[in-house]
Amino acid sequence: MSENAPDRDVVIIGAGVVGAAIARELSRYELRCTLVEAGADVGAGTSKANTALLHSGFDAKPGTLEARLVRRGHELLSEYAPRAGIPLERTGALLVAWSEEQLAAFPRIVARAHENGYTAISRLAADELYGREPKLGPGALGALEVPDEGIVCAFTPPLAYATEAVACGCELRFGTSVTGMQRLERGGFRLETSTGWITCRFLVNAAGLRSDEIDRMLGHDGFTVTPRRGELIVFDKLSRPLVNHILLAVPTETTKGVLVAPTIYGNVLLGPTAENVLDKTDTSSTSAGLEYLRSEGERILPALLTHEVTAVYAGLRAATEHDDYQIQIHEAEGYACVGGIRSTGLSASLAIAEHVCAELDEAGLPLRPKRELPDVRMPNIGEGFPRPYAEPDRIAADSDFGRIVCFCERVTRGEILEALAAPIPAPDLDGLRRRTRVLMGRCQGFYCGAQVRELLAGTR
């Protein structure tokens, strides 16, 4: 293509939950879109390793873009999730005070919630708190109830967004790292990638941990990403009856603290830590971090420590020196930078996409809605919703959905084969894990690993 006619209308860099959401939103219009991802799959980086909470935005800094987009994102994802098959449960959260100082912070937290437009927050006395959470550790003085907080599957949203984008005609390129950029004389960009050159009129940088590096390729220097490592512990499903709500800590100036939360898969989650690291690939767990989490868990929910640990993992958040999302639209260039999206990015993802799309419209991107849009429904992997192994009609139609491969998570052969034949197929074992829950159970693949590898190899 010549400079007069770029290959694509829009290129989105990064297929995490935010980049995939933006690709979905833009693909609903008559545009030639390409979503490029350095990795082998959608949502395989930062997006897969978070606390998987649906945030209401009650505690965001008032007046920030993050506060507005988390609140809007909560509304959009709450409506989209059941329609698209994304597991979501409105468990509610309890923000627990363990000292007089933390108790004294309640009026400030309530005032902030009201300033953010969230008025459903209410106070619980200690006896009410223990009535709601009888297994809570001793010494709690009271709590704030936030009924609209919830738990959501972190794996399915980016897959749902990208699947819908592809169904709408978006091109998806894996294994494509952006290594250089040039501005075209008549407007637009020429991207040098590991798989060749791409030209486009508009560019969206949703590169997560690498968003500052992409931004600097274009001569901007507005922020620096400092990876913030969060370590987490996942406890066995037998611990699930211990807790009814998300148990939040009273935040400080530097951290939101350690939480205990049920997961959509029937486990209990403890974490995260918050440690700045230099290496953007350092997702290692540390003995110090895990010991700190165990001590906090023993204080918050003592019986939790008597249960087996299913897994430990660490995620990296794209923290910056700013206390807000770094979303900048450079109208004259046709460039949107979507950086500094921290742990609330999952909750805000659809609102971020809506916002970026509207800003690109203002910048001159022609948006003509498509007449027909696909109806995407993802396979359910949430414990609180019907699963194939327990659906007689599903098994009658295809006996593979009655053949359990992973007994820990009750994943069937039919689900695995379905994931391998999906519009965006699982490329590896990690991809299968995020699509089906296989290998995620207490044996961590000891029993089913060989059979799963055979199924994966059989599709290659």
Image (tube, rainbow, N blue to C red):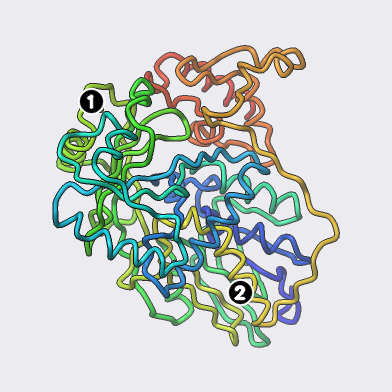
Q: Are marks 2 and 1 in contact (CB under 8 Å)?
A: no
Q: Secondary structure at mark 1?
A: helix
Measured as percent of width and height from the top left, residue 432 is found at 54, 32
**Considering only order in the chain, which callout, 1 or 2, is on the residue closer to the N terminus?**
2
* Residue at screen point 43% across, 60% down: 57
Q: CA distance from mark 2 to mark 1?
A: 57 Å
Quadrant of the drawing holding the C terminus: top right
Q: To which quarter of the image does residue 169 belong? A: bottom right
> Which label is found at residue 303?
1
Camera-nearest residue between 165 and 379: 379
The type of residue carrying mark 1 is: Ala
* Residue at screen point 39% across, 63% down: 113
The type of residue carrying mark 2 is: Arg
* Residue at screen point 62% across, 58% down: 35
* Residue at screen point 44% across, 60% down: 119
Picture layout, residue 147 above or below residue 366: above
Q: To which quarter of the image does residue 108 belong? A: bottom left
Measured as percent of width and height from the top left, residue 100 is found at 14, 53
34 displayed left or right of 230: right
Q: To which quarter of the image does residue 365 belong? A: bottom right
- Foreground mark, 2 or 1? 1
Camera-nearest residue between 62 and 138: 138
